[in-house]
Amino acid sequence: MRLSFFTLIAATTLWAEESSSGTPTSAGLTPLQPSELFSFHGQYTVTTQAHPSFSSTQVGDNSLTPQASCKTTNDLTLFLGVRVGTTGEFFINPEVDQGFGLSDTLGLAGYSSGEAYKVGKSTPYLRIPCCFYRQTINWGAADTPLEAGANQFAMTPSKDRLVITVGKFSVVDIFDNNSYAHDAKNDFLNWAVMDAGAFDYAADSWGYTYGAATELVLTNWTWRTGLFTLSQFPNSENLDTSFKQFEAVTELERAYTWSTQPGKIKVLLFANQGYMGNYFTALQQAPINTPPSTASVRTMNTKTGLALNLEQAITEQLGAFARFSHNDGKTESFDFTDINTSWSLGLIMNGKNWGREKDKTGIAYVQNELSSNAQQYFKAGGMGILIGDGLHPSYAPEQIIELFYSAHLFAGTNLTFDYQFVQNPAYNPDRGPVSLFALRLHAEF
């Protein structure tokens, strides 16, 4: 496997070099300097989130604790890269994590912090979540230059190109991106705001997986496709490296200009094939007076879904975004969270109007919903990836409002205050509402 992987890299690089040969202008490339052969960037983020006590008639194993709570997470990442030829890039990201999310990252379908993993530890631990190779194949005239940054070398690709990424990375590094809501280190924190809530993307408990993706860019159109491995079982720390359980995903993007301002619209389709428990079957086969369990009825099943994604600049200072996502809701969620339908919208503004151009503030609203079978499963006391309040009689959509203000302190460093108001946490109107407050310090180097 290792031999074939590196053989693929070498062959792809050789073909790309031959395809891009000719004048530097036609390939959108310039000769590399020695300093451009290697890339070194890093980041550190510390996030503290808390909530006061709130009303609760019952508490289950996966409930958000009703007592006042405060938790902190720390994340230090290095982004190390090396150029392979003129159009190939290899990156590895060593990362040190520490800390816990509120209630051990349980109790909300739209979980409140993208900085909190499903695995928490009180002492720092080292991981390598990302290790991948990316090949850009250019043809045509040079386009807008890409600046050097984390997992990105400075280059000027052609307007028309093919980008191939192979290795271990996050599905949402490439798919479901949005300029205004996709970065828990710099803007919104809530999972269902920064990503499409019903997009059950392949991932281990930290959000990464093995796979490959292609991006075909043709001027204002981009077509992405990918194949990724699911975890060994729902919400597992370990991935199914045999690829017997997998996700296929495709996304079509159209960039446009509306009233002189840029915008993008994306349509994403996905299908997961893996050992998943069916909600209806779990309800039927549960013994009397025993909560149903999808884990006890897992068979090979397919889950399908879609996501619509819109971003639109309104002025140079103000931008808007919206997402809608839906999956078939027949089987348990596999790797993301317990959401079958979700829609969100919001605004982000930079601080130029009040003399702080590098500051930004945003507001978002998201509503998450369950399918009818999933509603009955959780009301009967079933457990999911993130939610499970035990036996309870009621259901209501989970509704979340999030506001943040990010203040630029000095080069590469900002401090963010974040507030979230959650109505019907985990779809349970007998709990909450709950207010969550967060303070986040983020530094890049």
Image: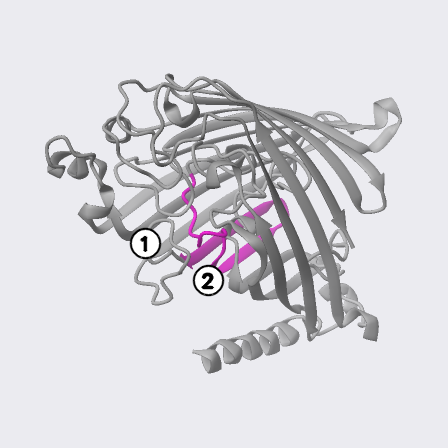
Does the magenta-highlighted stretch encompass residue 375?
no
Identified by mark 2, the residue type is Tyr
Q: Earlier in the sequence, mark 2 or mark 1?
A: 2
Q: Position of residue 315 (x, y in %)?
A: 75, 25
Q: Which mark is residue 233?
A: 1
**x, y percentage for residue 68?**
53, 26
Residue under the image location 64 percent in, 37 percent down:
48
What residue is at 45 percent from the left and 19 percent from the top? 432
Q: Residue 34: give its label.
A: none
* Quadrant, the N terminus: bottom left
Instruction: Give percent across and percent down for residue 54.
Output: 48, 19
Res 45 visible = yes
> Residue 328: x, y in percent?
30, 36
Amino acid tagged 1: Phe
370 left or right, relative to 44? left
Q: Do the residues labelled 2 and 1 touch (CB within 8 Å)?
A: no
Q: Which residue is drawn at 43% across and 40% down?
A: 199
Asked where in the image residue 236 lies, by quadrant, the reply is bottom left
Along the viewing direction, whichever of 42 and 267 lies nearer the viewer: 42
Q: Give the range drawn in magenta.
A: 199-228
Quarter placement of the C terminus: bottom right
